[in-house]
Image (spheres, rainbow, N blue to C red):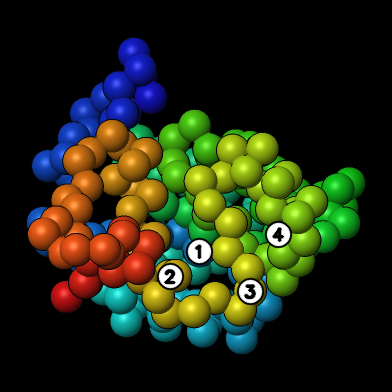
Amino acid sequence: MENGNAFPSGVSRDTLPQHFPVGMRVLVVEDDPNDLEHLTQILERCGYKVTAKASPREALKEVEENGEGFHFDIIMTVVHGGEEGDGFDGFDLLKRVRDHYPVIIFSADYSKEMVMRTINEGACDFMPKPMCYQEVRNIWFHVDMQRGLEVDDPNEGVEGASNNENPPEIK
């Protein structure tokens, strides 16, 4: 983000899809083909535009090939416990893209150590596998937060509710 702005140069709120978060562009990385297909289907049911990749290396190539402007709004990548030193993994992808995109890490390893590593290395969120529709549906919030946009309070005027209990509907 040049000059501390929330958007890269040439990108503004106007470059987001018209009915954002519907149409939000998600790059998702999952090495298990069945899980990748399932997560892609959930994201598409939410109205998101999905680019699915089977490895963090493929995802990085996609990001680098489309580096001018904002080709994606958010990146979601899988990590596995004990990946250190095993080649290019989800944490390596996180390190390369975290300054430009919000990154959500997901894993079947949801130990305290894994969650803390994820956050300490710069992910905006950690999601345990398997992920539920409700969690996936609300990933748009991280895009608004990363870009410094105002997020409408979906609970304004609703007594006793919080953002986590009653998220805005994606239509």
Residue 78 position within the rendered picture, expressed as x and y whole percent measured from the top left: 64, 62
Disc 1 designates what residue?
28
Of pointers 1 and 4, the one earlier in the residue sequence: 1
- How far apart are the alpha carbons under marks 2 and 3? 11 Å
Of pointers 2 and 1, the one earlier in the residue sequence: 1
Disc 2 designates what residue?
136
Of pointers 3 and 1, the one earlier in the residue sequence: 1
Of discs 3 and 1, which sits in the foreground? 3
Asked if the residue under mark 3 is in contact with the one under mark 2, i.e. CB atoms within 8 Å, the reply is: no
Residue 53 position within the rendered picture, expressed as x and y whole percent measured from the top left: 55, 65
Disc 4 designates what residue?
79
- How far apart are the alpha carbons under marks 1 and 4? 12 Å
Residue 2 is left or right of residue 150, and the answer is right
Quadrant containing the C terminus in the rendered view? bottom left
Res 130 label: none
Of pointers 2 and 3, the one earlier in the residue sequence: 3
- How far apart are the alpha carbons under marks 3 and 4? 10 Å
Badge 1: few (under 14), some or many (20 or more) residues near its Cα, within 10 Å?
A: many
Of pointers 2 and 4, the one earlier in the residue sequence: 4
Q: Amino acid at mark 1?
A: Val
